[in-house]
Amino acid sequence: MGDETNGLSAGWRQACGTMARIPMAGSASSLNVASAATVVSYEAAREHRGPTA
């Protein structure tokens, strides 16, 4: 999770195994870090559970 303007520094990007981006619709240009972490955690849990009946 990086700052709103520049994202992660080059050093942190190189240390990452995977980079992800949260698509934004409407007029919002960014999420605060807590909101972004919530979205990423929710999606990871959803994918881990697999398809629902």
Image: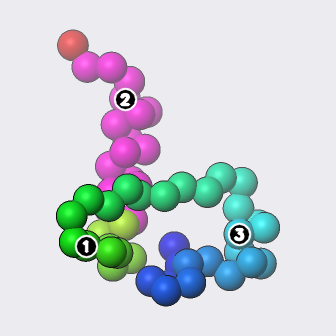
Tell me the crowding category of disc 2: few under 14, some 14 to 19, or many 20 or more residues within 10 angstroms, Cα based.
Answer: few
Q: Nearer the viewer, mark 2 or mark 1?
A: 1
Tell me the crowding category of disc 1: few under 14, some 14 to 19, or many 20 or more residues within 10 angstroms, Cα based.
Answer: few
Q: Nearer the viewer, mark 1 or mark 3?
A: 1
Query: Alpha carbon of mark 2 to alpha carbon of mark 1: how far?
Result: 29 Å
N-term mark: 2 or 1: 1
Q: Is residue 32 above or below residue 20?
A: below
**What kind of residue is marked 3?**
Arg
Q: Position of residue 18 (x, y in %)?
A: 65, 52
**To which residue does mark 1 refer?**
28
Q: Are marks 2 and 3 in contact (CB under 8 Å)?
A: no
**To which residue does mark 2 refer?**
49
Q: Position of residue 19 (x, y in %)?
A: 61, 57
Q: Report the residue at 56% width, 84% height from top.
A: 6
Query: Alpha carbon of mark 1 to alpha carbon of mark 3: how far?
Result: 24 Å
Task: Give the prevailing secondary structure in the magenta stretch.
Answer: helix
**Secondary element at tag 1:** loop
N-term mark: 1 or 3: 3
As drawn, the residue found furthest toward the top would be 53
Figure coloring:
rainbow
Q: Quadrant of the C terminus?
A: top left
Q: Report the residue at 49% width, 86% height from top.
A: 5
Q: Quarter-wise, where is residue 7 in the image? A: bottom right
**To which residue does mark 3 refer?**
13
Q: Is residue 6 above or below residue 26?
A: below
- Magenta-highlighted residues: 37-52
